[in-house]
Amino acid sequence: MTEPSHGPSTLPPAVRAFDLTADRFDQRFGGWLSVAAQRRAVQRYLLDTFAPGDRLLELGAGTAEDALFMLERGYHVTVTDGSPQMVVNAAEKIKRAGYTARAPVAQLVLEELDEFAERAREQGISPHDGAYSNFAAFNCVPDLSTVAAPLAKLLRPGAACILVIFGPCSIGEVVVQLIHRDWKAAVRRFRGSGAPARLGGEHFHVWYPSPRQVARSLSPWFELRRVRGIGVLVPPSAAEPWISRFPRTVGALEAADRVLTGPAALLADHVLLHLERTGRQPQ
């Protein structure tokens, strides 16, 4: 595991917010059925995309729930997150599970991806076979074009990059927030600029780009191949913890999502973007 490159006071606001909640993150979100259902949908896609034994890079790994899932199935995963405490907790989980040899853990703030890629080059680390990021870490980066070339340096040509970001128009969130009579939250994804957010007492901004906007930002090093909805009918976390009282309902909505994942992708809570690393070589 690399040493943290930041103290909490120097972290970007969004990363600092998650750092402050890292020790209770699993306790708060781990039992929510809507989150688990959306995570399963992403994990199924990861297994369909990557071959067992592939060397993968996870960005914004949090407490390593998805990394552990992939490690249990024979993958190698470089586990990264911007939060120093998330990194510590992830490393401890991976050590307890016995996967340390296949899962290096490092602190990585996405805005500093170029420095990370340069260190990998200097250390002679070969490009990864693929990359993925679940649950909207990239929505906290105001300008995705700044991470495009550095991310390309870390992947071999032809590699898949799976980014799961907040969708630009979540029908579920609009409905839930209108029920709560929170009008600003109901329309926050339609803002042209970053929408204010708060977690752990920390204020930060979240951006909601469309798949086309993401593709333009990551061009010419990545091409968008596929878009899938994650949580079309499965409610967003704003419906928790209430919706977890109805496991059969969540299960039925999860089954329906498998049918709607393609045609209604842009109405989902999250959208999964399947990008492919082009042959263009960054300087």
Image: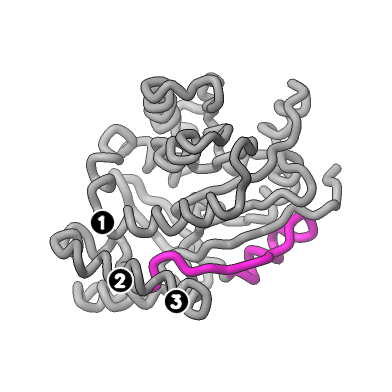
Residue 11 percent coordinates (x, y): 48, 36
- Residue 221, relative to residue 179: is it above or below? above
The residue type indicated by label 3 comes to Leu
| Element on which disc 1 rests | helix
> Which of these two is toward me, 108 or 135?
135
The residue type indicated by label 2 comes to Leu
> Which of these two is toward me, 174 or 253?
253
Q: Which residues are magenta?
A: 211-232
Q: Are marks 2 and 3 in contact (CB under 8 Å)?
A: no
Q: Is residue 269 left or right of residue 54?
A: left
Residue 185 percent coordinates (x, y): 32, 70
- Disc 3 or 1, which lies upstream in sequence? 1
Residue at 37% x, 21% y is 96
Which numbered circle lies on residue 33? 1
- Residue 253, relative to residue 220: is it above or below? below
> Which of these two is toward me, 279 or 51?
51
Residue at 22% x, 60% y is 240
Residue 151 percent coordinates (x, y): 69, 45
Q: Residues within 10 Å of mark 1 (few under 14, many from 20)?
A: many
| Element on which disc 3 rests | helix
Q: Is residue 278 shown in magenta? A: no
Q: Residues within 10 Å of mark 3 (few under 14, many from 20)?
A: some
Q: Is residue 31 left or right of residue 4?
A: left
Residue on which the image places disc 3: 260
Q: Is residue 228 shown in magenta? A: yes
Quarter in which the C terminus is drawn? top right
Within the image, what quadrant is residue 112 found in?
top right
Which numbered circle lies on residue 253? 2
